[in-house]
Image (cartoon, rainbow, N blue to C red):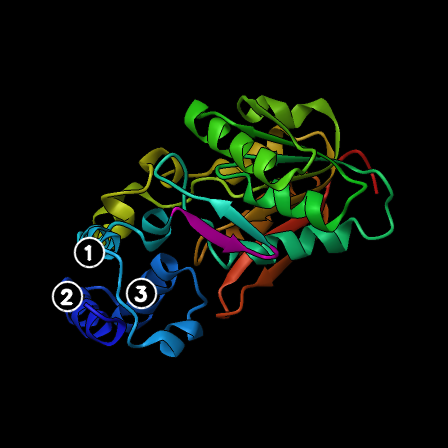
Amino acid sequence: MIVTQALRLAERQLADAGVDTPRVDAELLLAHVLGVSRTGVYANDHQEVPGRFQVLLGRRSKREPLAYVLGEWGFRRLMLKTDARALVPRPETEIVVERCLELLRGEREPRVLDLGAGTGAIALALADEHPGAQVTAVDSSPEAVALARENAERLQLPVEIRQGGFEAAAEGWDLVVSNPPYVAPGEWDTLQPEIREWEPRDALVGVGLQEQIARVADTRRLVLEVGDGQARGVAAALTSLGYTDVAITSDLTGIERVVEGHGRRGS
């Protein structure tokens, strides 16, 4: 089978499976097996496609997340190893990193904690884009910790990665950042199969965890990712707990996505 045939087959099969972006996914799968860019697929339209393509196409047709099928996913300037041990890094979380970098601007060696690290995306991006930062990443899942360590080693970024819970936020930091579980239990059955059937539920479902982190955190600054419609409530909780300069930032789709504040260690 040549590339043009494989594209038609894949797009039709993925559309029949209910995938939202069948053409894009088909292109990315082909690019992966051919070792070219997505646009490079069309420069090789008569090339024979390796048999491995059918295997990957079958996995995606079962609604396995594309990032897991490819085994890697881009996040800011990094390419991260991705699999079912942790959530797929989302583009909206890149806004969280932007806010952290802005708050750390001008600080030479800030101590930063990423709480609930998953793949290590936030922690590794901060270490990459603020080389002086002393970054620690903590996750309660041993599987996620192992994946984050693999990413740190692959990228050769000096991030301390360890297993732990919210208590790590009480150790005293210049900045604590977290993208905690924030999907309400009642929303679970409404989620796409890619999320509901493949990604770790414990990393997604949680209520009130941002406020729990804010209560525990001993930090100069706190940056939290929140779900759609949650920002105002989380901001009010931070204010009630004594945080100052509380602010909300929207993601690129206009959803209020990030809540930040200055903590009790001062500014």
Whether residues under marks 3 and 1 lie with C-beta atoms below 8 angstroms apart, the answer is no
What residue is disc 1 on? 54
Position of 159 with respect to 229 (left or right) is: right
| Highlighted magenta segment, given as a residue range | 71-77
Position of 47 with respect to 77 (left or right) is: left
What residue is disc 2 on? 13
Vertical placement of 183 versus 116: above or below?
A: below
Residue closest to the eye, 25 or 263: 25
Q: State the image coordinates of residue 173 (x, y, percent, origin top left).
A: 74, 31
- Quarter occupied by residue 131: top right
Residue shown at 67% from the left, 24% from the top: 170
Q: Earlier in the sequence, mark 2 or mark 1?
A: 2
Q: Secondary structure at mark 1?
A: helix
Q: Secondary structure at mark 2?
A: helix
- Which circle marks residue 231 in the picture? none
Magenta includes 166? no
CA separation in Å, label 2 and label 1:
11 Å
Residue closest to the eye, 122 or 182: 122
